[in-house]
Image (cartoon, rainbow, N blue to C red):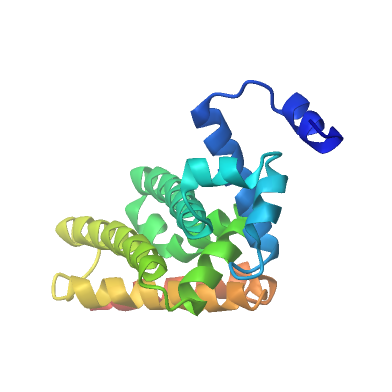
Amino acid sequence: MDDTRQENDEKHPRMRGDERKALILAQAKKVFARKSYREASTGELARASGITEPILYKHFGSKKKLYLAVLNQLSEQFLERFRGLVERRARKDLLDCLESFLLDYRTAAMEEHDSIHLLLNASLESNDPEVAQIAQAHNREVYALVHGLLEKAQQHDLISRQLDLSAATWGYLSFLFALQYRAKANIFSEYNEQTIREINRLWLQALIIG
């Protein structure tokens, strides 16, 4: 056994299969955040986790499957953070939740900046149908979250009962897509909290008036 292999074995001794898989995912996320899918080699991905390429293939089958697993995990983690912020605020004040929706999205994104960049870059740049499927599932989850909040607000007469809830939901999503494009260009800081808050306030005001 060469020195590198011995060092890696000492670094991660006797890991269970699920532990090894979690480690590979965590390290692959870092590699894909620094490089594009095409630029990242299987050798680099394996070395980042202190394993050989055959072990990487054993757990994920291919670089593509590893990449998709990373994207799925990032989407799930982001949605968990975002949903938590939104639901906590909604339990206290539904209108405040709707008025702060874009800010909560930004907060959830900024908590793990590199990860959201990876997810957004993949969804915006890739023509791969499997990557597109992950992006579509992600957006459906966000759509359902917004629609549910608006439906509850309408039931409690907090917003106009004349609203088309689907159109109102897509209005929110259009603002989120704008945030995503700014995140891709690395100018979240220029799209500051005051600006986002005012955009959100004006949109909610329009929904209340109907």
Q: Residue at x 28, y 71 (%)?
A: 169
**What percent of the width, then of the height, locates residue 182?**
59, 77
Nearer to the camera, 146 or 120: 120
Query: Image quadrant of residue 151?
Result: bottom left
Query: Quadrant location of the C terminus?
Result: bottom left
**Residue at 21 percent of width and 55 percent of height:** 152
Q: How many marks?
A: 0
Given the current orientation, which residue lies at the most extreme right position?
3
Is 72 on the left-hand or right-hand side of 57?
left
The residue at 62%/51% (across/down) is 28
Q: Does the rendering let one see residue 184?
A: yes
Task: Reply above or below: 79 against 130.
Answer: above
Residue 140 x/y as whole percent:
29, 63
The picture places residue 153, in percent across and down from the top left corner, at 24, 59
The answer to which quarter of the image holds residue 113 is bottom right
- Residue 74 or residue 181, whichever sits in front: 74
In-front residue for pair 209/90: 90
- Name above or below for residue 166 compared with residue 1: below
Q: Which quadrant of the view contains residue 16?
A: top right
* Residue 77 in the figure: left or right of residue 184: left
Question: What is the residue that sits farthest to the front in this orientation?
Answer: 1
For the question of whether residue 199 can be seen, the reply is: no
Q: Where in the figure is residue 24, as x and y percent of width and height?
A: 59, 42
Quadrant position of the N terminus in the picture: top right
